[in-house]
Image (cartoon, rainbow, N blue to C red):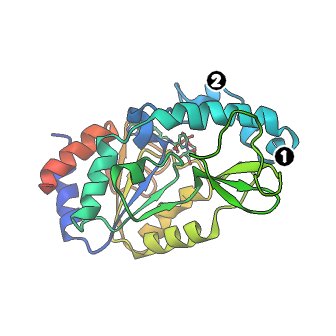
């Protein structure tokens, strides 16, 4: 057994408010690569296509990659054991909420209900002119860039581009959850993306015990983390589920 699993289970069992904070690492075993690192998307693509100014100036070029990566490719992914264990923990009443930086919808697909999407999501497209929203599932992405059926304005996925602010409600909900937590579980996040990277510190200010799951140490490991569980998210979360008896 991986060191720290038993202690983690005990902490979770005796906690009042447990929050999970997830990054790209939790979805790697669902076949979605992270942005950074050895197999990261930024080794294959220039990230400029996700800059809001580039998107406005070159919507067709930007959308070509958005469609290829976030809809054709990410769209095939299924939740893995780590997503499912979190959903089960919530159903059992031992996990209060999830704050995710991911935009892939895999927590919801696994059955999680209370998910704060700090960087938005890819389920919906929003018109940059009239603000009308369209489900991505009904919008045909045959002609790019996609246009609003109401006013003809440019449609944009409802996830946060570089240079955009964090959705207000998601930010408020996330900060509130962190500040209420007494156990805070970080799974697969480098801690390099501001302002999301600050969230675990808010939990720590509240006195929360910080448990981290990652294949390698991150920016959190030697700063806020109390208990570092090294390994793949699916393996660690599977062992945790066994230890929690769920
Ligand atoms: P990140 O901060 O999300 O880091 C990924 C982390 O996951 C790294 O620390 C890595 O060591 C760890 N990791 C990799 N495989 C793992 C595994 N099997 N189990 C546990 N941990 C594992 O960094 P990023 O990828 O640069 O992402 C930047 C931003 O973009 C974040 O907000 C991220 O959530 C988002 N993003 C989202 C998706 C998605 O929706 N699935 C994919 C890529 C990036």
Q: Which sits earlier in the primary sequence, circle 2 or circle 1?
A: 2
Q: Quadrant of the N terminus?
A: top left
Indicate left or right for 157 with 232 as reference.
Answer: right
Between the residue at mark 2 and the residue at mark 1, the CA separation in whole angstroms equals 22 Å
x, y percentage for residue 240?
Answer: 20, 49
x, y percentage for residue 38?
Answer: 53, 25
On the image, which quarter does residue 50 sit in? top right
Count of number-bearing discs? 2
The residue sitting at 43% across, 30% down in the picture is: 31
Indicate left or right for 78 with 100 as reference.
Answer: left
Foreground label between 2 and 1:
1
Q: Residues within 10 Å of mark 1 (few under 14, many from 20)?
A: some
Compared to residue 5, the image places residue 25 above or below, namely: above
x, y percentage for residue 117?
Answer: 52, 59
Provide the secondary structure element on which disc 1 rests. Answer: helix
x, y percentage for residue 164?
Answer: 73, 56
Provide the secondary structure element on which disc 2 rests. Answer: loop
| Residue of label 2 | 44
The residue sitting at 56% across, 73% down in the picture is: 172
| Residue of label 1 | 56
The residue sitting at 51% across, 37% down in the picture is: 75
The residue sitting at 42% across, 47% down in the picture is: 106
Any part of residue 101 in sight: yes
Confirm if mark 2 falls within 8 A of ligand 1: no
Compared to residue 16, the image places residue 68 above or below, namely: above
């Amino acid at each position: 057994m991986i060191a720290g699993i038993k202690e983690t289970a005990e902490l979770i069992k005796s906690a009042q408010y447990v929050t999970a904070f997830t990054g790209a690492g939790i979805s790697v075993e669902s076949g979605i690569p992270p942005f950074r690192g050895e197999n990261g998307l930024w080794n294959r693509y220039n990230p400029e296509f996700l800059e809001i100014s580039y998107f406005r100036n070159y919507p067709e070029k930007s959308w070509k990659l958005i469609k290829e990566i976030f809809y054709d490719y990410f769209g095939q992914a299924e939740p893995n054991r780590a997503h499912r264990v979190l959903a089960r923990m919530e159903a059992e009443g031992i996990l209060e909420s999830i704050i995710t930086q991911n935009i892939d919808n895999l927590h919801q697909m696994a059955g999680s209900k209370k998910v704060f999407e700090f960087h938005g999501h890819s389920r919906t497209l929003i018109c940059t002119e009239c603000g009308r929203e369209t489900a991505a599932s009904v919008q045909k992405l045959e002609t790019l860039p996609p246009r609003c059926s109401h006013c003809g304005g440019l449609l944009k996925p409802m996830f946060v581009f570089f240079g955009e602010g964090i959705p207000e409600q998601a930010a408020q909900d996330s900060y509130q959850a962190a500040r209420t937590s007494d156990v805070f579980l970080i799974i697969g996040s480098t801690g390099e993306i501001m302002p999301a990277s600050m969230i675990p510190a808010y939990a720590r200010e509240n006195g929360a015990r910080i448990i981290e799951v990652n294949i390698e140490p991150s920016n959190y490991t030697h700063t806020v983390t109390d208990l570092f569980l090294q390994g793949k998210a699916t393996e660690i979360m599977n062992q945790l589920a066994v230890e929690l008896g769920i």
